Amino acid sequence: MTLAPVSRDPSLVRATLRALMVPRRLVPIALVAASLVAAQVSLSRDPLGTPLSLLMVVAFVTLAPLSWRVLFPEGLDLAHGAIRLVLYVIVGAGVVLTLGAVVPKVTGMGETFLTTRPSLIVCGMLFLVGGWALARDIGLEESLDRERRRADLLVKEADQARLLALRTHLDPHFLFNTLNAIAEWCREDGEVAERAVLQLSSMLRTILSGVRSSTWPIARELELLSTLFDLHRMRDPNLFTVTIDVAGGAGELAVPPLVLLPLAENAVKHGPAAGHRGEIAVSVTRAGGQATIRISNPGPYRGPREGSEGVPSVRERLQSAFGSAARFDLRAEGERTVAELSLPVGAVP
């Protein structure tokens, strides 16, 4: 059986030493160390007993967890665990005997509290058990940090996936009808056809650029909505009217790209396109640290629609970007439907 190589990663040494300096570890280590040093000072007559106890404490605290982490890296094949455990015991015994027996003999020290045989056995157990406990604690903390970073990355990737899905969220019937209308206008009115192509191209380009951004100004979002409404009215300019109003100060709002697009599509689809002619109104206002975005359309709200993906996607993206600081409400106001978002101003999604 071949022994797996021992880890010699210098970053492991630095990471271990930094972890030992964390207060939640350093404080209990200092208390135990102070107790050993105090016992050595009070129960030993040799003046070299104090520096020896300090040397032993420093050696134990640094070498014990470090040697365990070097010998037992993450992902180690358990088949090699017994051999490495023997090596760990040898390292511990070597450190304890060197500092507790060899050094006193070389320096001519008299007997001290920590250099007696019972004390050396206790020190050996402290080295082995303490080193294992500290190393395991540090390793588990590092694993938890990695999992947290991985979770954050997965959240970002999920949000990116939702953005990619929004690229294809546009109602296919709307796109097909627009393209068919452009084909007709090419024969009947080239100028209108050209304008429609440019507007559709601009809209799709904006959508694609939004996928690459985590946030953009509310002005770009409203520009996208305006283009969407213009394309819907291209065939029938009298189908509905549009008002977009941004109050002073609300223009600073940053929003997740394309977050309003599903609501604007619904406003047309379940309003004017469903026979409820009238005004689609979009407003952005600010009160203190909160901004309110309101999209209303003619036609009464009939409640959640089975199989709808647009509204749930808006709720999920707001939750992902702002957490509990954002609110979303979809309700009826008389014969109109209102979608209202409340977002924190200045927050970066």
Image: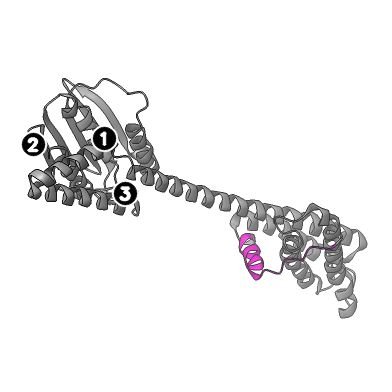
Q: How is the image coloured?
A: one colour
Q: Is residue 180 left or right of residue 346?
A: left
| Label number found at residue 347 | 3
Q: Residue at x 73, y 53 (%)?
A: 133
Q: Position of residue 119 (x, y in %)?
A: 87, 60
The residue singled out by tag 1 in the image is 173
Please tell me which of labels 1 and 3 falls first in the chain. 1
The amino acid type found where label 1 is placed reads His
Q: Residue at x 83, y 54 (%)?
A: 79
The amino acid type found where label 3 is placed reads Ala
Q: Which region of the structure is painted magenta?
A: 2-19
| Label number found at residue 316 | none
Residue 94 vertical position relative to residue 321 in the rendered view, above or below: below
Q: Position of residue 240 (x, y in %)?
A: 11, 32
| Near-viewer residue (184 or 170) | 184
Residue 128 in the magenta stretch? The answer is no
Check the picture and name the quadrant holding the N terminus. Answer: bottom right
Residue 121 vertical position relative to residue 273 in the rendered view, above or below: below
Please tell me which of labels 2 and 3 falls first in the chain. 2
Residue 288 vertical position relative to residue 24 in the rendered view, above or below: above
Q: Position of residue 85 (x, y in %)?
A: 83, 58
Label 2, residues with CA under 10 Å away: few <14, some 14-19, many ≥20: few
The residue singled out by tag 2 in the image is 237
Q: Is residue 134 left or right of residue 211?
A: right
Label 1, residues with CA under 10 Å away: few <14, some 14-19, many ≥20: few
Please tell me which of labels 1 and 2 falls first in the chain. 1
Q: Is residue 2 left or right of residue 117?
A: left
Q: Residue at x 82, y 61 (%)?
A: 88
Where on the picture, by quarter, is residue 288? top left
Label 3, residues with CA under 10 Å away: few <14, some 14-19, many ≥20: some
Mark 2 or mark 3: which is in front?
2
Mark 3 falls on what kind of element? Answer: loop
